[in-house]
Image (spheres, grey):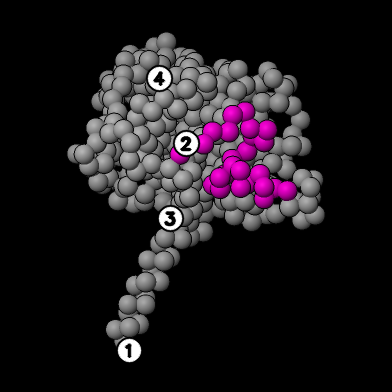
Amino acid sequence: MKKAFTVFGVIMVVFAINLVIEDVQACAEIFIGKSGKVNVSARNFDFFTAGDGVIRFSPVGTARQAQYTPQNCQPLKWTSKYASVTFNLSIAKTKSINDGEYEAGVDGINQAGFKVGTYFLASSVFAEDGVQTTIDIGSLMQYMLDNFNSVDEALADLSGNRYRITSTPTGLVEIKLHFFLHDVTGASAIVEFINGKIEVTPNPAIQVLTNSSYGESVEHLKLYDGFGGKLAIPGSIDSYDRFVRGVHYWKNLPAPENPTQGVNYGFATIQLLTESPGFAHGGTRWTIVTDLDNKMIYFRTLNNPAVAIIDLNKLSATLKGTSRIEVLRTDLAGDISDLFIKNVKKTNP
């Protein structure tokens, strides 16, 4: 009997871990671009650990390849055409990486004003056969930022069948994502991986994304007051509930008159989808608001509520090498662009 109880206990622990993994990155984004003159992305990054990561500046000419490659496949390789600033989650002990460290792309923008955000989607299913050149999902954000200046360019490449996209099995969690793309023209797209195929929602009518597939989220929205149903706007941390709450506030948000107001609106609205620490699957670790038109990034973290600012225009005009800053530094406030400039000689590509 004692042995049976022990086995049952192990099963329950594994089940609990799986429940956590299903929603490990309960992130959300609200895109504010109603006026046609202001393009601002506001997003939270939620995780069940402290969210160790780096903010990386990458110049034009950076050589890269996919960080994870399945057996009998070749990694996709490329050299960057555009400079970028990216936020990356650091994960140790990925299965096929020599140095034992993996950087999963979370959010970023390049010098053309093309922006990519990643959001955990446990239901993602990737093609298991096809071309043998592959890129893992955690490396895909950087690949797009390095190579494309618009949503249309990125979508054309994704549909070209030159490479196959896989999940990223790490020692911590198998990374499965969907993407929210934007550019300075106001174009947007949601990219998902459903039943082994890439599904794209171009210029979504509702500019909110959480951790359920976009189509299912929109269907769920119809149950609520103001969207065809009778239910009150929900307040839980469930992915569907955060989507409904985000859409409710996005729908009622005035069009910003200028980028500064757009950034202020971004922080105000994404705060309503923030998760407090202490939940089994984690809470909000980073908040990032990006002004696409001016290539300005604003962010704060759980342990440092001061807003820090990065000017991509300044970095791309000044730096010829890679530079990085730890996300969780608690001394970051105001314009920190010069920190990247000071660190450039100390950082390897």
- Determine which residue is flagged by label 1: 1
Residue 205 in view? yes
Q: As drawn, which residue projects farthest toward the left?
A: 98
- Determine which residue is flagged by label 4: 147
How crowded is the residue under tag 3: few (<14 C-alpha within 10 Å), some, or many (20+)?
Answer: many
Considering depth in this image, is 87 or 10 the residue closer to the camera? 10
- Determine which residue is flagged by label 3: 21
Marks 4 and 1, the one that precedes in the sequence: 1
Question: Pointers 3 and 1 in contact (CB under 8 A)?
Answer: no
Q: CA distance from mark 3 to mark 1?
A: 30 Å
- The x, y position of residue 192, in whole percent, is 50, 39
Marks 2 and 3, the one that precedes in the sequence: 3
Which image quarter: residue 58?
A: top left
Q: Identify which amino acid the numbered label 4 is placed on.
A: Asn
Which image quarter: residue 331?
A: top left
How crowded is the residue under tag 1: few (<14 C-alpha within 10 Å), some, or many (20+)?
Answer: few
Q: Quadrant of the C terminus?
A: top left
Marks 3 and 1, the one that precedes in the sequence: 1
Q: Secondary structure at mark 1?
A: loop
Task: Indicate yes or no whether the magenta region holds residue 114.
Answer: no
Which image quarter: residue 316?
A: top left
Q: CA distance from mark 2 to mark 4?
A: 19 Å
- Determine which residue is flagged by label 2: 198
Q: Is residue 132 left or right of residue 334?
A: left
Q: Secondary structure at mark 4?
A: helix
Which stretch appears magenta? 197-222
